[in-house]
Image (tube, coloured by chain):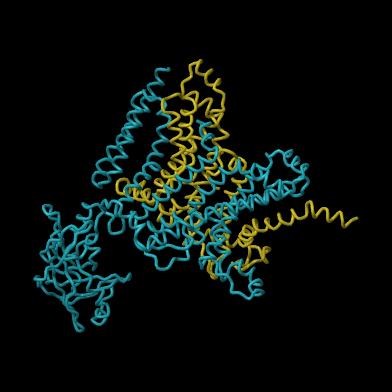
Amino acid sequence: MIYLSMTLSKIFRYTLLAIFNALIVYAVPLALTFESWFFLSLILVIGILVNIVYFTDRFQPMKWILPGMIFMLSFVVFPAVYNTYVSFTNWSTGHILTKTQAIGVLEDRVFTPDDQKGLEFEMYILQDLDLNFYYVANLDSENILFGKAVSDDEIFSTSYATHEPSLFINGEFSTPDGYYQLSGKEQIANSTTLQELSLVIDKNTRAQLYKISVFGASTGRLTSTSQLYTYDEMNDALFNNATNTLCPVVKDNFECEGKEIEPGWRVYVGGENYSKLFSSQRIRGPLGVVTKWTFQFALLSVIFSFAVGLLLSMILNKDGLKFQRIYRAVFILPYAIPAFVSALVWKGLLNPDYGVINSWLGPLYEMLDIEPVKWLKTKESARSAVLLVNTWLGFPYMFLITTGALQSIPKELIEAAKVDGATGIQSFWRITFPLLMVSISPLLIGSFAFNFNNFTLIFLLSGGGPPIIGSEVSVGWTDILISFTYKLAISGGRGNLFGLASSVTIIIFALVLIISAISFRYTKRLERIYGNI
Amino acid sequence: METSKFLNWVKEYGWRHLIALIFVTFAVYPILFVATNSIADFANLTNSKLIPDGLTLKHYKLLSSDPLVPYFKWLYNTYKVALIAAFFNVFLGTLAAYAFSRLQFKGRRASLLTLVIVQMFPSFLAFVAIYLLFFQISDIAPFMGLGTHIGLILVYLGGSIGFNSWLIKGFMDTISPSLDEAAKVDGATDFQIFRRIIAPLSRPILVVIFVITFIGIYSDFILAAIFLKDKNLWTVAVGINTVFIDDFNADWGVIAASSVIAATPIAVLFIFFQKQITGGLTAGSVKG
């Protein structure tokens, strides 16, 4: 029986491994075709690890650890390494592809040679109910071609025109059902669009509208297209068949007569992104602002929420006070709600024109005779609002931890100070507060580190805005480093600057490392960790 | 006599109640505002009345019927992704924790320390690399590439497995080794000890870690936002951002209703597990 179950578990194990290896074997050639070298190495490392660990019995503990480790390696450690690599490349919009892929795209481009005075024939322009254009080309009575007219972008995805002799009855063109025939005037009105469209007849031949006639049928012309660029491997250059010129490689693009050809490809650029961050005035300025504000935001958030939390826990730390449990329950509420909901709700409340905050403050504005605050629209109001909301989000946590810490301070200490004539304020600053800080400072540093990267709050509340005018990249006065990175990489309106964004990420990594080192140095956190190791 | 007694009360307790009440207002007002607006007949941003004139459920009905806002699809996506990711996270974390707690091997301390150090850096920091990595995975294996739930779940799995297994390991260490030693003498294998003894006894911490991980993933915005492009695949955190328009004409009642639905289950879970989530070891791993 035992023998049987052993065999069964073995069969199970080998089946899983076989499936796993099949996946690896499937993925490797794909990774090769797409030239994802980093990805390829990741697959290979995981593949080898899994096979060594599960085929042999030599690494028993690893059998338990490896499944979790694979995910950590793939999606935490590997991205960190990959991020470093990306920060040394020009990876960005226009430079997304590898060189081979870019050449592939460019070699698909076509052009119409000038010397081709193709055949001329009758053209009819139709439109369907979705307002798509269709062409009918009457080459001769034997060849009547019909199909959708497409722009250059769609040429490779469209199907060829079909032969439709039934469109002509007794030599007269009749509009098929569901289509509308454009008159000459309507063709002129649409001529800009129509100029760009062509009817695809075969791989190299197209029919285009040539002359619009107000009376009778317009004229079409056949054009044959040829490949625009041919890659010349010997010279590592692109040959432009239209102009008969050689377009050499200039860094990360081919350049034809001084003009860059899109798309380029991604290349290693050394420290270029970093030097851009620190030397380009229009990036360095905003980066400095953002970095300074990141520290201010994280520090002030901790200070404010700690101050409120401590105040409340001190107030409630009194024997015989009624409603203590109710107060405690209520103070936890802001913490219990997902931050993405709270941030959005506050954004609504703070709306300068319709929000309830300004309608509350209305009488105050009138009394002081000042303009209502344009919450989130100016630098100062946006920064104050972000801090206000983060205090709201953060004070319950501080309240909870200070309550716990206060209760663990022996009452005798305070009593003894009282006997010695210390005032309440003295005994707070000399005894309670220092003792509190001993147990709470690691948590405060943790809170600082959390707010340092509090993307959700900033992004959903202020969106980083209001924008800093005159900067080369999109960035605002309440942006912190991580939201600045997000704008560079994903949503900046200047394309995806992955390389540059990654170099900012490296700065964040370095700062987080320093913060953690400080936390290890000045608190007992490391000992606590060692205690659990 | 009566006045001096009152003054005494003010000096001892009264001012405490006053300050506490101010902060009760601060804490509760936005929450009540949203809750009442979600059931108020006439709901808008300026409506500062906390007790609405007429009660209605029409905003909730509207939210479930608007084809342009597939809110309940988002909710379903969120629960699906968060439950699956949290389950595997705890499952794989528990396996690793068992090895760290019960098996002796070279490099055990070093790898534990590495785990903790690696997890000091929140996994979303390298979101650019994660984005580009999955951008390439889309070419090779589209079913788990950018824009898919599988891909997102994989990223969430990596995100906290190290820290979680470290926490679980800490708990397992408190289970007396004499139990499994006795089992070993009786011929139990490692797997049997794990399944029959250690895992069942670790259940309290596993539940807590599961809840913490679930709440963390449910509340994640940044990774879901870069990952999911298709409206029908969004999670609540991503979708709700598009519902919220702080315009005068915006249907604030619907917005409030969507907030209530998104927040209530998490708030209940959180309050129920509040002690464990904020207590000691786990502090700051979800929020802070």
Image quadrant occupied by the N terminus of chain A: top left
Q: Is residue B95 above or below residue A456?
A: above
Q: Is residue B124 above or below residue A162?
A: above
Q: Nearer the viewer, residue B181 or B16?
A: B16
Q: Nearer the viewer, residue A464 or B141?
A: A464
Q: Residue at x 83, y 56 (%)?
A: B7
Residue B76 percent coordinates (x, y)? 49, 50
Q: Colour of chain B?
A: yellow
Residue at the extreme bottom: A215
Q: Count the marks.
A: 0
* Residue A174 visible here: yes
Residue A366 percent coordinates (x, y)? 65, 75
Q: Is residue A236 above or below residue A369?
A: above
Q: Nearer the viewer, residue A149 or A464?
A: A464
Q: Is residue A68 above or below residue A472?
A: above
Residue A409 horizontal side relative to residue A115, left or right? right
Q: Quadrant of residue A304?
A: bottom right
Residue A10 horizontal side relative to residue A190, left or right? right
Identify the chain drawn in cyan: A
* Residue A170 visible here: no
